[in-house]
């Protein structure tokens, strides 16, 4: 046999969404219909008990009282007949007695309990005795023996009449007690009906609220999960599949979503591998080209004509640019795979900053951009030293990427400033410029790969992603504040001990 829990479990996991909602509603309607049906049947029973009291008990009680009240009238007629000897009185007595007999017969159809039946039988017996005695009195009166008849009337007949009266009183009491019992049962039934209707109503309302809440909670929970996962996919960080708990439409959606996310991950991994393999394969021939160009430029194989020299310079610059791009791609994929080894040692941040500025100064001067350190001019500030435990070449790469971007994007006449701040256990590097700034909509994703806020300025969109990955590999972080038209301010915070455990 299938238990309710098994049925619910099956319904939870196998049914379609529409069927679940439909079944929950049908279940609730069925419960309410059952409660209504049961209430109606209880009401019917209540009405039956009351009808019984009205159509049987009350007339029976009335008849029993009438019976008792008939006895004194019979005795009066009997007395007049015996004393006066007038047959008319006997006829009246006989008619009255006939009425009493008919009433007793009617009562037989109204009594219901055993006690009532016993009492009615007693009334009959006593009435028969009284009738018999009256017959004997009549015989005596007919024969002119009024004295003997009076003796019989005063003695046995009076006792029989009183017996009939007493039996009628007992019959009334029995009917009354049966009526009291019926009323008690009716009250009990009414009380139970109310309790059951209230309990059933509360239970069905609770079941309705619970059922609806169950469907709603499951629905919104699954949708919330899916929406969170969609958000993660959009951020590129989705890794865990969305759990599929049932077989409804939402589960289909979750399954399709998981398959899509898995395919996306696969494509992403293939893309990464493709780039990394390609970059690797390109690096060696490009390095050879660069070395060859250097040899040619140095005149190792003889002097070059001015035209050849120009061509060799162009080839050299192109090879450099390609090599830089390839190195960026390789660095980033290694950083993301956690494969880029950091050679950390205690170094001087001041010295690294000076190196970065020296390297970029010719470019800044050529563009007419003012390059400074902590508000001063290069070389003036930073005469002390800031000790940090870092991979110096990688930190230099961070500085060059940030200052290089600032110089690249700041127009002539603008200024770029590199500031260092030393704190107890961390250092803060700030690169600010008076350039075009970054549009607000591009800002949240600017550290992601291939994100560029300005078109037509060359570049690869990898520099900031490398800065972020390198800062994080050193246990640090990077942030940016920028307003379009008002310049940008990049901040890198690094632990002084390089985040080493
Ligand atoms: P690339 O400079 O090669 O395009 P980056 O990752 O270094 O790649 O920079 C990504 C984008 O961020 C740039 O294309 C540019 O739109 C924006 N950006 C970076 N630095 C600045 C800056 N100092 N001022 C304005 N925009 C900047």
Image (cartoon, rainbow, N blue to C red):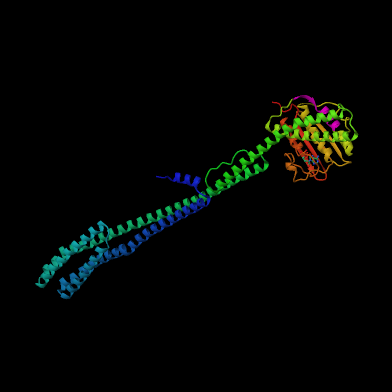
Q: Nearer the viewer, residue 351 or 340?
A: 340
Residue 498 placement: quadrant: top right
Could you tell me residue 269's position as x and y percent?
65, 37
Could you tell me residue 431's position as x and y percent?
81, 36
- Residue at figure coordinates x 61%, y 40% from the top left: 262
Examine the structure image and report whether residue 345 is included in the region drawn in magenta: yes
Examine the structure image and report whether residue 337 is included in the region drawn in magenta: no
Q: Is residue 205 above or below residue 429?
A: below
- Residue at figure coordinates x 81%, y 31% from the top left: 290
In this image, 362 relative to 187: left or right? Answer: right
- Main SS of the magenta part reads helix
Q: Is residue 86 above or below residue 347?
A: below
In this image, 482 relative to 189: left or right? Answer: right
Residue 260 placement: quadrant: top right
Q: Nearer the viewer, residue 420 or 284?
A: 284
Q: Is residue 472 above or below residue 111?
A: above
- Residue at figure coordinates x 36%, y 58% from the top left: 45
In this image, 130 relative to 342: left or right? Answer: left
Q: Is residue 42 visible?
A: yes
Could you tell me residue 168's position as x and y percent?
24, 62
Q: Nearer the viewer, residue 216 or 146?
A: 216
Count of labels in the image: 0
Ligand 1 found in image quarter: top right
Assign the C terminus to one quadrant of the image: top right
- Residue at figure coordinates x 71%, y 31% from the top left: 473
Q: Is residue 205 visible?
A: no
Could you tell me residue 276's position as x and y percent?
70, 34
Q: Which residues are magenta?
A: 344-359
Assign the N terminus to one quadrant of the image: top left
């Amino acid at each position: 046999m299938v238990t309710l829990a098994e049925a619910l479990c099956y319904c939870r996991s196998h049914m379609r969404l529409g069927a679940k909602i439909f079944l929950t509603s049908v279940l609730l309607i069925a419960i309410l219909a059952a409660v209504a049906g049961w209430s109606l049947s209880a009401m019917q029973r209540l009405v039956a008990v009351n009808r019984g009291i009205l159509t049987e008990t009350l007339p029976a009680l009335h008849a029993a009282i009438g019976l008792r009240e008939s006895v004194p009238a019979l005795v009066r007629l009997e007395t007049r007949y015996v004393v006066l000897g007038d047959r008319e009185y006997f006829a009246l007595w006989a008619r009255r007695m006939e009425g009493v007999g008919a009433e007793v017969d009617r009562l037989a159809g109204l009594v219901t309990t055993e006690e009532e039946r016993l009492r009615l039988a007693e009334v009959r017996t006593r009435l028969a005795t009284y009738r018999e005695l009256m017959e004997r009195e009549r015989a005596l009166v007919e024969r002119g023996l009024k004295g003997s008849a009076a003796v019989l009337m005063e003695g046995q007949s009076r006792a029989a009449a009183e017996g009939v009266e007493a039996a009628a009183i007992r019959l009334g009491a029995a009917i009354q007690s049966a009526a009291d019992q019926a009323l008690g049962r009716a009250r009990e039934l009414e009380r139970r009906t109310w309790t059951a209707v209230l309990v059933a109503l509360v239970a069905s309302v609770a079941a309705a609220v619970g059922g609806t809440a169950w469907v709603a909670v499951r629905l919104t929970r699954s949708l919330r999960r899916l929406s969170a996962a969609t958000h993660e996919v959009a951020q590129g960080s989705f890794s865990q599949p969305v759990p599929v708990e049932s077989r409804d439409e939402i589960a289909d959606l979750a399954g399709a979503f998981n398959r899509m996310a898995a395919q996306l991950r696969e494509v992403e991994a293939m893309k990464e591998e493709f780039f990394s393999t390609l970059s690797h394969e390109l690096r060696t021939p490009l390095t050879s080209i660069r070395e060859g160009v250097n040899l040619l430029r140095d005149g190792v194989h003889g002097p070059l004509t001015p035209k050849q020299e120009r061509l060799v310079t162009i080839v050299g610059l192109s090879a450099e640019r390609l090599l830089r791009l390839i190195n960026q791609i390789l660095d980033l994929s290694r950083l993301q795979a956690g494969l880029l080894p950091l050679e950390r040692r205690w170094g001087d941040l001041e010295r690294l900053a000076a190196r970065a500025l020296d390297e970029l100064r010719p470019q800044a001067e050529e563009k007419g951009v003012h390059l400074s350190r902590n508000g001063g001019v290069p070389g003036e500030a930073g005469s002390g030293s800031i000790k940090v435990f870092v991979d110096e070449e990688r930190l230099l790469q961070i500085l060059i990427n940030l200052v290089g971007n600032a110089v690249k994007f700041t127009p002539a006449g603008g200024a770029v400033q590199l500031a260092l701040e030393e704190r107890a256990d961390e250092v803060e590097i700030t690169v600010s410029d008076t350039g075009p700034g970054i549009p607000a909509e591009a800002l949240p994703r600017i550290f992601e790969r291939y994100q560029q806020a300005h078109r037509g300025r060359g570049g690869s969109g990898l520099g900031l992603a490398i800065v972020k990955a390198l800062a994080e590999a050193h246990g640090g972080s990077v942030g940016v504040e920028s307003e379009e038209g008002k310049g940008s301010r990049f901040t890198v915070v690094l632990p002084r001990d390089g985040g080493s455990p």
